[in-house]
Image (tube, rainbow, N blue to C red):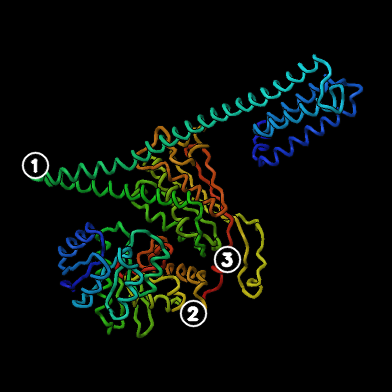
Amino acid sequence: MFFIKSTMFRKLSSTYQLLISIGLVLFVAGGCYAFEDYLGYRVVAFILLLTVSLVAVVFDIWPVLFAALLSALLWNFFFIPPKFTFHIGDAEDVLLFFMYFVIALINAVMTNRIRKIEQEVQEKEEKAKTVKLYNTLLNSLSHELKTPVAAIVGASDNLLEEPSRLTEDNKKELVSSISVAALRLNQQVENLLSMSRLESGFIQLKKDWCDINELIYDVANRLNEQLKDHQLIVTIEEGLPFYKLDYVLMEQVLYNLLYNAALYTPAYGDIRIDVKNQNEKLYKLNTADSAHSQLKKEIHLLSIVIEDRGAGFPPTEIEKVFDKFYRMGNTKAGGTGLGLSIVKGFVEAHNGTVVLENVPHGARFTINIPAETSYINQLKNE
Amino acid sequence: MNNASILVIDDEVQIRRLLEITLESNNFQVTSAADAKEGMRIAATHPPDLIILDLGLPDENGHIVLKKLREWFTKPVLILSVQSSEEDIVKALDNGANDYLVKPFRTGELLARIRSALRSAVDENDDPVIDCGDLQIDLATRTVKKQNEIVKLTATEYKLLSIFAQQEGKVLTHQYLLREVWGPGYINQSQYLRVFIAQLRKKIETDPNRPAHIITESGVGYRFIAKD
């Protein structure tokens, strides 16, 4: 708490720091002057010293030195007898005055130095942390990018250099491994591009009316190959309205989740998708446009739940799975550790939320997105 | 239709080589150009049957090249782009491109698009009946049959389907479809299109959730495929 306060003070410009220091010293000296009869001028010295120490904790060196000098002069002028002169009568008081001045200066310089060292240590620690994180990211990324490249280079070398020694089947296998690796590489590049779009901070949503049924099946059809050994059970609420969403981003959100589910669900296990309209209207749009249009313009919550029959996630890891480049120890090949952070980023770009929880026999991702809805799809045929 | 001549305009030598090998082995005649200037010169001196144009050329923006080409070149232009930016694709299609492919593309996909574009450029459909495998669309009598049974379509559904069928294999943008079916005032009313696509799929697709005829092109539009 105190630390936060002091960093806050330090952000003030040096002029402000100086003004505040002068004000504080003057204020304390004034207070002491009023009660001088009770305090005695030597106690006043300690009170002023304390004030300078406090200033030293929160402010930079120059305002502190100035406060030290000012307080010494004030003490001398107003408190040390004879008063209202800079002349000091007693030899003991002369010594006291010089000691006061030296202590105040040491106080100012030392406190400042300690603070600087503290800051350096902190910066060093932060830097070490960043380097460690960066190394983890780099390791994960280079592994994910270089594995397919290695497959492509190796297979094509074989085909180029020793075509006569290879059987037709071997050749076919090599060619198909090139193809698989290239597609995998492409997927990683797509993910990296999406991630950098997210990182850049300005994803512009191209919202348009989406038929959720079309969206879900479109994604499922694209994953035909990966889902061929699974049973996909899609339940879409009857009479679901259209939602205004960015179709392409939502497609990638669902693709990544479904791809994950397919990867971790053993063969013949089911994967469930449940889509519901949370009926509570979040709010109504009272635009001039809606007055003369037959469309109801309302914001509803779209809820999409994807449940797999995989091993679930260790409870300690659940928090981390949406982190960039986070991969669990038992992760299968083919992921970048980017898929779920892209999911989170794209859902949040829609002001929505995504939650992961373990359920009996698997994991459940729940996406909730507030979106404008249209019930025009329930109009009679024209 | 083979032996058609194709001009490839792409600055990447690897992509040019790949396209040359792929296309030549499928009996197309291929010439290629590494930049817009050379591409325009070849297109003017030896007009090809189809042009494959990369949007990212070193000397000129691909959209401008496309516009210049379209001032006189009436045959199909197929766009190649690296980034799957839907805006870019829609813009190119609006500027008169016939179709697009995003790198990396599959060879099968490339050949299908080329054949479809060449086909639509050649046949000036005299036959009013369009045969789409399990689906027959008779433009003269305005009837649609699925497995020899008449499918009842509303006027709007029929209009949408006939636009699709007459431009088989070509991607049609949301805006284009809205303008053609409902009129220029409706180009932002995409919800109408969603409604009728869903209805039409229910009537003509064997499995509306796995459409074989009306294919979604994410963020761009729809494509009608005749055969299963």
Q: Nearer the viewer, residue B114 or A125?
A: A125
| Residue A306 x, y percent position in the rendering | 49, 47
Q: Nearer the viewer, residue A155 or B129?
A: A155
Residue that label 1 marks: A165
User: In the image, is A331 to the left or to the right of A352?
Assistant: left
Q: Quadrant of the N terminus of chain B?
A: bottom left
Residue that label 2 marks: B184
Q: Secondary structure at mark 1?
A: helix
Residues at circles 3 and 1 in contact by the CB criterion of under 8 Å: no
Q: Nearer the viewer, residue A245 or B154?
A: A245
Residue that label 3 marks: A374
The answer, for residue B155, to whether it is visible in the render is yes
- How many marks overall? 3
What's the residue at 37%, 77% (across, down)?
A: B144
What's the residue at 85%, 24% (across, down)?
A: A79
Q: CA distance from mark 1 to mark 2?
A: 64 Å
What's the residue at 71%, 24% (across, down)?
A: A104
Q: In the displayed structure, would residue A184 be above or below residue B88?
A: above
Mark 1: few/some/many CA within 10 Å (<14, 14-19, 20+): few
Which amino acid type corresponds to the residue marked 2 in the rendered image? Answer: Pro
Q: Nearer the viewer, residue A3 or B160?
A: A3
Viewer-nearest of labels 3 and 2? 2
Residues at circles 3 and 2 in contact by the CB criterion of under 8 Å: no
| Residue A158 x, y percent position in the rendering | 15, 43
Residue at the extreme left: A164
Q: Which chain is indicated by disc 1?
A: A
Q: In the displayed structure, would residue A64 be above or below residue B51?
A: above
Residue at the extreme top: A92
Q: CA distance from mark 3 to mark 1?
A: 64 Å
